Amino acid sequence: MSDTPPVVYAGPKRILSGVQTSGQLHLGNYLGAIVKFVRLQEEAECFYFLADMHAITVWQDPDKLADQMREVAAAFIASGVDPAKAAIFPQSAVPEHAELAWIFNCVARLGWLDRMTQFKEKSGQHKERSSVGLYTYPVLQAADILVYKATHVPVGEDQKQHLELTRDIAQKFNNDFGAQGFFPITEPVIEGPGARIMSLRDGAAKMSKSDPSDNSRINLLDDADAMATKIRKAKTDPEPLPETLDELKARPEADNLVGIYAALSGVTKAQALTEFAGKGFGAFKPALADLTVAKLGPIGAEMRRLLADPAEIDRVLKIGVEKARAVAAPVVADTKRLVGFWSPKP
Ligand code: AQP
């Protein structure tokens, strides 16, 4: 063993996250990720990308993909992400993501990817008919993060395993190429009651864009009536809300609705329970619907306003691409040098 202490990453704090451009954004994306994007932009340099390359790991209509991407951009901005503070850009417009992903494909081990539960869930019974991209998706995700040497990644709990893979890839790259401290060992930012929002129809399933039932999720572009109706119809049980978190945990649907209430009002689940313990869903659901409409209604309205001027969104994205490439290009150049790729003699 060498006496030299391991070199730790000494670069600046940087935040990176992305959202797939695969359909309408929902409350889970908002509470699990976008709310944190807004908070973190005050703390460090931020890069928020529109994950169109991840989106095409399953079929996307080419006539709709660019508009879906603008919709996610509009959701970020309408929620309070400030393009003057954070770079917002389409993943496919920064080729360094794909370039680094190939190198990482050669660093990551098959056994690591075989353990990824999201691939198992998304490929279901049809593994051999899934795209190769769906399988290597977490490797591209590692490249998305490390191409900016991001130190912190705000995500929902479903992404925890992928973040662990990113850390493994960074560590193995640093070891293999004698470059300790070159890539940071990125920290996930997963916290609070919004980190895992469940389907309104099934407390055991994650709220998801790809759930065939629209009633399972609140979309950011739903109108007030649709939001209130979905909450009114949300699956629950006949009991009044309990006093303790332990009792709540045993009732997944009630737990989810209380979690949504807590996350939207910026309190803990325990605090939300003190307000509603002993009350039935007849009292709780209308309060939750009012809160949801009050929080998300203005975001949907602002998204519609922004989407009416796609050229303005594109202007913001072009600036974001420039900011992103200015950081990503030198990281890829350094990575290629470490790998030993050719560069012309000066
Ligand atoms: N239900 C959720 N609760 C909390 N956070 C969530 N996120 C997604 N669903 C929830 C977080 O939102 C960010 C963007 O996710 P994504 O759209 O890139 O991918 P996803 O996790 O696969 O989201 P969906 O809605 O489930 O999409 P589909 O159905 O297309 O797979 C991430 O930070 C994620 O954690």
Image (cartoon, rainbow, N blue to C red):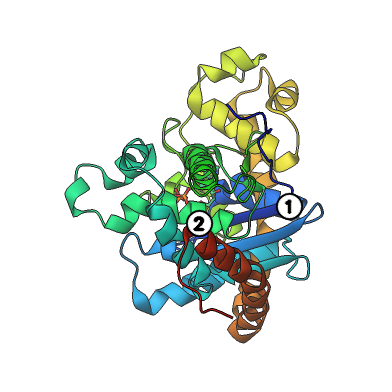
Relative height, residue 213 to residue 84 (above, below): above
Q: Secondary structure at mark 2?
A: helix
Residue 299 at least partly seen: no
Q: Which residue is mark 1?
A: 11
Residue 195, image x and y in percent?
Answer: 59, 38
Q: Secondary structure at mark 1?
A: loop
Q: Residue at x 60, y 81 (%)?
A: 314
Which quadrant of the figure has residue 112? top left
Q: Residue at x 57, y 54 (%)?
A: 145
Q: Residue at x 55, y 65 (%)?
A: 332
| Label 2 lies in ligand 1 vicinity (Cβ under 8 Å) | no
Q: Which residue is mark 2?
A: 143
Label 2 is placed on what type of residue? Ala
Relative height, residue 324 to residue 314 (above, below): above
Which of disc 2 and disc 1 is earlier in sequence? Answer: 1
Whole-number angstrom distance, CA of label 1 to CA of label 2: 17 Å
Which quadrant of the figure has residue 65? bottom left
Query: Counting other residues with Cα less than 10 Å from the Cα at mark 1, is it few (<14), some (14-19), or many (20 or more)?
Result: few
From the viewer's side, name the closer residue of 175 and 283.
175
Query: Counting other residues with Cα less than 10 Å from the Cα at mark 2, is it few (<14), some (14-19), or many (20 or more)?
Result: many
Residue 111, image x and y in percent?
Answer: 32, 37
Q: Nearer the viewer, mark 1 or mark 2?
A: 1
